[in-house]
Image: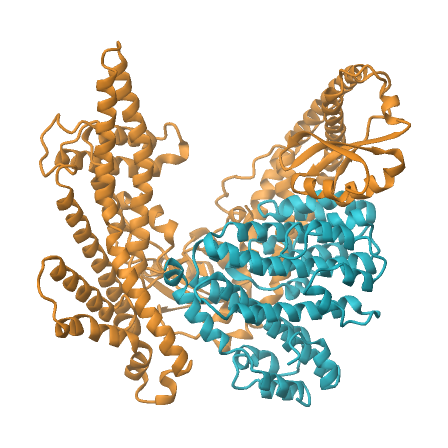
Amino acid sequence: MTGGVRYAKPNAQIRAMLSRLLTAEQKRRLLNATDVADVAHQLAGTDYAKPLAPVLSGAISLPAIEKALTSILVDSYARVIATLSGSSQDLVVEMLRRLELNNVKTIIRAIVKATAAEEVESMLIPLGRFSQLPLADLLQVDNLADALDTLASTPYAQVIGNALDRFAQEHSLFPIEIALDLDYYRRLWRKVEALGGQDKKIACRLMGIRYDVLNIEWLVRYRLLYNLSPEEIFNYTLPFGYHINDELVRRAALVPDFLTLVSSLPEPYRSLLSTITPANEVAEHAESVLSGYLVTVAERSLVGYPFQIGVVIAYLWLREAELRDLRAIFEGKASGLSAEEIRELMISRG
Amino acid sequence: MFTPEEMEQVNIVVHADDLEETSKAIGQMGILHLFDVAQLGGWAVGLHWSQVRGLERSYDALARRMMSLLAVLGLPSAVPMPETPRIDPEGVLTQALGELDEVEPVADQIVARQREVLEQLAKLKVMAEELELISHLAIPISDLRQLRFLYLTMGLVPRENLERLRGSLASIPHLVLPIRSFDTRVLIFAFSARADKETMERALSAAYMEKIELPAEFSGTPAEALAEINLRSGNLAAAYTETQYELAQFGDCHRQELVQLWVTVEANHAVADAWTHLGRTERTFLFSGWVPASLETTLVERVEDVSHGQAVVRFSPAPRPGQGPPSGPAIPTALRNPPLLRTFEPLVRTYGLPSYWDLDPTPIAAGLFVLMFGAMFGDLGQGAILAILGVFLARGFFLPEGRQLGSILVAAGFSSMVFGLAYGSVFGAEDLIPALLFHPIRDVIFFVEVAVAFGSLIITAGMLLNAIGALRSHDYFRLFWSEYGLWGLLLYWGLVVLILRLLLGREVSVLLAAILLGIPMLVLYLREPLGRLFQRGPNLKSLIPEGGAIYFVESAVGIFDVLIRFISNTVSFLRIAAFALSHAGLGIMVFTIAGMVASLPLASPVVIILGNVLIITLEALIVGIQTLRLEYYEFFSKFFSGQGVPYDPFRLKHTRRLN
């Protein structure tokens, strides 16, 4: 009953927004578009027409399109957040903060590479009132020590501070970025655990699957691309998940190749990834397949009792997947890829 | 009162030769709230003086350097602005950078030495702490460092990484011993077989451990090394004091020039910042902003004076919402309340600043706060204590920044005293004085009815204020069709009348329910298309641009939501009665306990005094929060969006932005 009252409005709003996602037919037409201009034309009449109009009207710029698509995602989050309250709102705000984490990484990379403030500013995702970053001050900073001072009031300072020694020793941003990722996903999980009753159960399952996917993606990268040691891999993965547990991570961290890694995973991941032939871009393929699985999970979550957090999370995942697909279509068309080649880059391959 | 200060939009065109003098004059007056000229509309976009951003950024960087230098040298950064500061942003920037380049390196050198000393001291401190832990061992440190079969290392690990670190070492025999917590990190000792040293080190590094080396420079047992560390720490502390003295000396030598330079930089920084809003043609500059209508003449006279009558100053009234350019400048809000009410402005600002066309709820918020606080915490004696405490706070005792809080407390205390007389309550005793109105605990039902009726009136007042605000801004959609507009008010009172009739046992016919609830609900259900129909005429396509099905589903849920909110908002006022009852209840409890311990000497008065202290502390806080909650959620939310832009005129002072 309380769920009915609490989620009546969010659910109505989300159902309305779900009905505005692209249909399979619309995606097919987009894939078969002749070029970027034709993609823009095909988007007329969809929800994307208006927000993309300013970047599609003149000379086409992929970074501008990418930025506009990200703004659409932020806007979707903002609209969902406005309908929620309490711990479910906190969770969605934290989910949105993943984009802020990207901004932090962008700024740190820019500081290390001494990129001009104007250029960095153009790369940042505008998060408006959801941003905790003192951006104006951060853009003036030219070294990591000052960045830490400027970030003092945010959760990022401590994490970066802990990784600074390793950055100095290894001259690589990898330790900082992975520390930021781990910290972010720990914080996000705390928000999941702060939910009550049925919401907590549903979110633990959905986000658990998300964390499984994340851990598998990281395992593939750490083990097969970066050749990290098992103890490093274990430290750089997350102690949360749905099907994946510490023991599985420990085992998977020892595997010599992709096929053995896949066979060490539980279902459904084993079946999903066994379709991939080991090749150079195995990490990208695995990520694409796993993202597709998240879309399936999200679609299934929309069936059944509607007044719960699962609908909210599912919608946001679907929206994000659709935006990633659109990005792939725009990039593919700009690079002259065929429809079939672009389809390979998409999450939902229809 | 009730409405913010009336603002006028002003455009000032000055000749390039007069730019600096005019900027100085406007900055000294501190009355012009600037906005970017590009916001004037399409024609002005090309005028925007964007090139000046570089100058402003240089000032940002310079100001940071200067503030840091002043702090290092112990010099004040909050200095009064001279009557006639030199305004020449380009020239002052060059001069300041030159002077800074001379002074800064010397200070930096001393600071670098100081930092080195501090780093050594910190290292020694950590070493001492570690050695303290093993100081009972009579083994030389060198032996610990060169364990033959065991590998021992120590360091600080982020607390949340500790479990993962242990998990990552599952494949080797190991011991990870947390020794002590430091804020977010834990000092650990980690042991493994020497053969597993590499595995251990990789895991520790991946867990972001900051390694602490066993000091190689010390010999002997840990206790002997500790004594040596203490000696070195003493020497370093003396070296640190010396660098501090050097900095103070250096600061004293350069005090006058640096403070003078800082004041000039601050003023020019403010001007450079203001210039980023300006428009520019070949020979003229355009200032655009908002100024209180009452200060129009003052501004004109001053600008004409400094520009020798060359400047062109044009005023225009603030456009109503929807009248100006689509992305036109927001009109800033300057509240204008008498000093007594100004004390209560923070209560409103905590929720948000009224927008220019909103009503200023401060007078009503102040009255309601005082009234509801007293009604929930009615006690003659405890109210008097609160009022006295408020007087002390208002006079700057206890907390220098608590003056405003003190004034609010005085008003709340007096209200509490008045309601104490009405309820016959003094220091928690309910029978010492007669109740002038009623005893909350004896007339519970009556009090509950009064509280809910009061709530209905407050909600109605909120919706009426929404209507007045909508009228002021000519926002007719909000006036008629918003959920807290006139149709919403009809729905609310329809609901109130129906519930009253049910409670009084009167008949409620279907026809009556249809008239009182059905019609307003139907109208609100169709409010978007109806609103558009009245505004734009019968163009069916544009009535529901979102699409019919989606609109009707959303609107149905919206109406359900509004009804629930109306009921829950009204019931929420029950807390006025509930807190008054709990106050009486707590008083009874204190006196009951005092009666139970009456046989012990002095026990009764002690219990009564402590009980009263507890009630005053807890209740004043809780009732204060609940009163604000009622104001914010049940009252403000009906008419007040809090989206106002604060009136922030350009002044020749820039530090506040940097801080």
Residue B288 x/y as whole percent: 46, 66
Residue found at the very far top of the displayed protein: B601
For residue A209, which quarter of the picture?
Answer: bottom right
Residue under the point 55% across and 66% down = B16
- The quarter in which the N terminus of chain A is drawn is bottom left
Chain painted orange: B
A68 left or right, relative to B224: left
- The quarter in which the C terminus of chain A is drawn is bottom right
Work out whether residue A3 can be spotted.
Answer: yes
Which of the two residues, B207 or B422, is positioned nearer the viewer here?
B207
Which of the two residues, B341 or B39, is positioned nearer the viewer here?
B341
Colouring used for the render: by chain
Q: Does A155 appear above or below B212?
A: below
Residue A18 x/y as whole percent: 50, 75
Residue A11 x/y as whole percent: 43, 68
Work out whether residue B63 can be spotted.
Answer: no
What shade does chain A have?
A: cyan
Q: Does A327 appear above or below A242?
A: below
For residue B9, which quarter of the picture?
Answer: bottom left
A24 left or right, relative to B194: left
Residue B40 x/y as whole percent: 46, 72
Residue under the point 23% across and 58% down = B459
Q: Does B190 appear above or below B348?
A: above
Which of the two residues, B44 or B517, is positioned nearer the viewer here?
B517
Tally of numbered discs: 0
